[in-house]
Amino acid sequence: AIWLMARLCRTTLRHPLLLVAGAAFWNFGVLLGVVGILMGDSTGYQWLEFPGYASIVLFTSYTLVISWAVLMFRFRRGDAIYITQWYLLGAFLWFPWMYGAAQVMLFITPVQGVMQAAVTWWYGNNLLFLWFGAIGLGTAYYMIPKVIGRPVYSYHLATIGFWSYALFASWTGMQRLVDGPFPAWMITASIAATILTIIPVATVGLNHHMTMRGYFRLLHYSPTLRFTIFGAMCYTAFSALGVVMSLRSVARYLHFTEASIAYSHLGLYGFFTMVMFGSMYYIVP
């Protein structure tokens, strides 16, 4: 994300040693978290397993690292903001909001009873969509046009896709709690929002396909393009599967099966990780 922001802002990275220090703190926080789990200090919440003392280090490190990306955007050259920058800036600002909210509501002043499950799933789904998803989509929007050497098919479609993604994805999460002891409106709102994520999925998929039209032969020669296109296809499959699994008629059969884990893995490994592999083939000589 930092590499993309520097390239698109057409500016140099200021004070890189401080950024390296932030990365070192991050690795130290991960080490603390892993040791804490092995010592029995796991919190027991999905995707928030690291104990509090590791979370403080990680959050501080994250703040240091992302501050550099925001600073580069502040000192960018030119007024135009590329699609990738929309998604990256969104991810930078969304993550501290959802991570901080989850920490407050689960550990600092914890909510009671079943509301802990509601907060956990809200955080988990938002992490998938608004952090991993936003960075993955932003990277794909950069890599595909860059490798084939032509502009994105439609900025209008990209605008619709971004804002609808920001609006609807943040409401998801509660659909994982179908038939649980929760107010019906909470689950119904998340189901409706999940169904409406079809709008950004369709616009992003159409934009990528039309951008690639006539250039699919390059898939034979470019590892970056192969990984990125495969990841983009998995994003479509991941989102479509999420819509189907959110329906009450389907959830009652899949709710307590491995399908829920498979859904998360499709988003993380099928979509996000593949796009990251593609970007590494482009960035690293």
Image (cartoon, grey):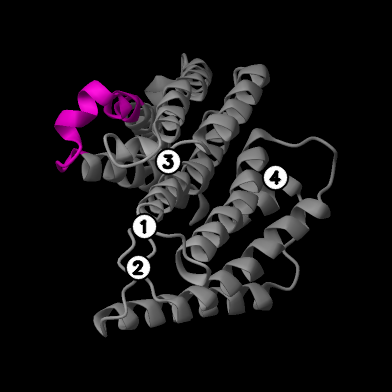
**Disc 4 residue crowd, few under 14, some 14–19, many 20+, Cα 10 Å:** many
Please tell me whether the stretch drawn in magenta is mainly helix, strand or loop: helix
Q: Which of marks 3 and 1 is nearer the N terminus?
A: 1
One can see residue 269 in this view:
yes
Mark 2 element type: loop
User: Marks 4 and 1, Cα distance to the nearest angstrom?
Assistant: 46 Å
Q: Nearer the viewer, residue 61 or 244?
A: 244
Kind of residue sitting beneath label 4: Leu
Q: Earlier in the sequence, mark 1 or mark 2?
A: 2
User: Marks 1 and 2, Cα distance to the nearest angstrom?
Assistant: 19 Å
Mark number, residue 8:
4
Q: Where is residue 155 in the image (x, y as percent from the top left)?
A: 67, 21
Mark number, residue 224:
3
Mark 3 element type: helix
Q: Earlier in the sequence, mark 2 or mark 4?
A: 4
Mark 1 element type: loop
Q: Residue at x 35, y 41 (%)?
A: 267
Kind of residue sitting beneath label 1: Gly
Q: Residue at x 65, y 34 (%)?
A: 83
**Disc 3 residue crowd, few under 14, some 14–19, many 20+, Cα 10 Å:** many
Q: What stretch is highlighted in magenta?
A: 240-259
Kind of residue sitting beneath label 2: Glu
User: Marks 3 and 4, Cα distance to the nearest angstrom?
Assistant: 18 Å
Q: Please identify, in this view, whether the residue under mark 4 or under mark 1 is nearer the observer.
A: 1
Q: Is residue 147 left or right of residue 177?
A: right
User: Marks 3 and 1, Cα distance to the nearest angstrom?
Assistant: 46 Å
Residue 198, above or below 55: above
Residue on which disc 2 sits = 49
Residue on which disc 1 sits = 113
Q: Earlier in the sequence, mark 2 or mark 3?
A: 2
**Circles 1 and 2: CB distance less than 8 Å?**
no
Residue 250, above or below 264: above
